[in-house]
Image (cartoon, rainbow, N blue to C red):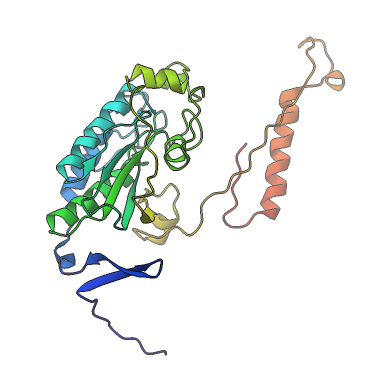
Amino acid sequence: TGNKQCVTPPRHLELRLAGRRRPVLTMAYAHKVRANAKRVLEELHHLRSFGAAKPPHSVTSARGGDGQLKGVVRPALSAEDVVAREWFSDRMEEAGLISTGLDKIGTVLGRGTVETGAPRLLVGSHSDTQPEGGWLDGALGVIYGLEAARAIQEAGGPNAIDVINFQDEEGRFGTLTGSTAWATGSLDLHAVSKIPLVAGPAITLEQAIRNNHLEDRPLMQLEEDHPYIGFFEAHIEQGRRLELAKQSVAVVNTIVGCRQFRVEFNGETNHAGTTQMADRCDAASAAFDFVHEVRTAFTDLRSETSLWTV
């Protein structure tokens, strides 16, 4: 209409699902919900203590407000990862969630206290890291989810938030291992770890499960009697868009879509000191030329958000 009006939210908010009116959230307690920033920071710092990298493995400039180095080595199903997940499971229980404990691969879910079958929101991320990964990558999402559930609980509201900590979203044993297994039940036990040996020797997912004594635990999957109205993940910015715009938060509207190609350059072995340049077939030189040509060609074709890596 062109007229701006201030609308007071109703004391009781209802959501229509499948044509039925079902109460999801009452607003009577909403004004009492307060996140505890001090508690969030304390738990983020405690979580990064599991596998905290020591110099020279930490980037010395990567420091937080407490002046401590922030690099973390906590790859999926490492000893540090499993201990961190057990700690997180305990925090969920303290927050009033019903924790499933670690499943076969280490994914852990904390269920809210609304009745079975009631709509709920799934919130979370992952706590495994890249070797020498950032201390807030994934960790921010699981701690924020925990705090959201805890704040609602402390405000006296019905907790319709489930908090999940997926396993191996960083790809030690494959692409999005934990969330894929949870959503589809698909799991490749013969997948071999792909990350650098700084995180440990190359082993199969099955061996890693056995090493952590999880082989007898069930693989958790999405349950039909626990419908979700959506999934929310808070994530640390991994670029500079918000920083340059001087914004503290934004909503993601697109995500990177990847196409990957493997290109091989075959050369010819010959004497390094006597083979003339005209007779050489150097694979490395051809690869360097290729990288330069790719950058030149893509620079003319790219959009503002196009990315490439060789």
Side of 209 relative to 91 (left or right): right
Q: Quadrant of the C terminus?
A: top right
Q: Is residue 51 visible?
A: no
The x and y percentages for residue 210 are 37, 18
The x and y percentages for residue 155 are 13, 59
- From this view, report whether residue 188 is shown above or below residue 302: above
Seen from the viewer's position, the closer of residues 17 and 5 is: 17
Q: Can residue 267 be seen in this view?
A: yes
- From this view, report whether residue 169 is shown above or below residue 83: below
Q: Quadrant of the N terminus?
A: bottom left
At x 46%, y 35%, the residue is 177
At x 33%, y 31%, the residue is 103
- From this view, report whether residue 232 is shown above or below residue 278: below
The x and y percentages for residue 23 are 26, 67
At x 84%, y 16%, the residue is 276
Residue 263 picture quarter? top right
Side of 59 relative to 116 (left or right): right
Side of 23 relative to 38 (left or right): right
Seen from the viewer's position, the closer of residues 234 and 285 is: 234
Tell me how many marks there are.
0
The x and y percentages for residue 293 are 73, 41
Seen from the viewer's position, the closer of residues 218 and 129 is: 218
Residue 168 picture quarter? top left
At x 36%, y 17%, the residue is 211
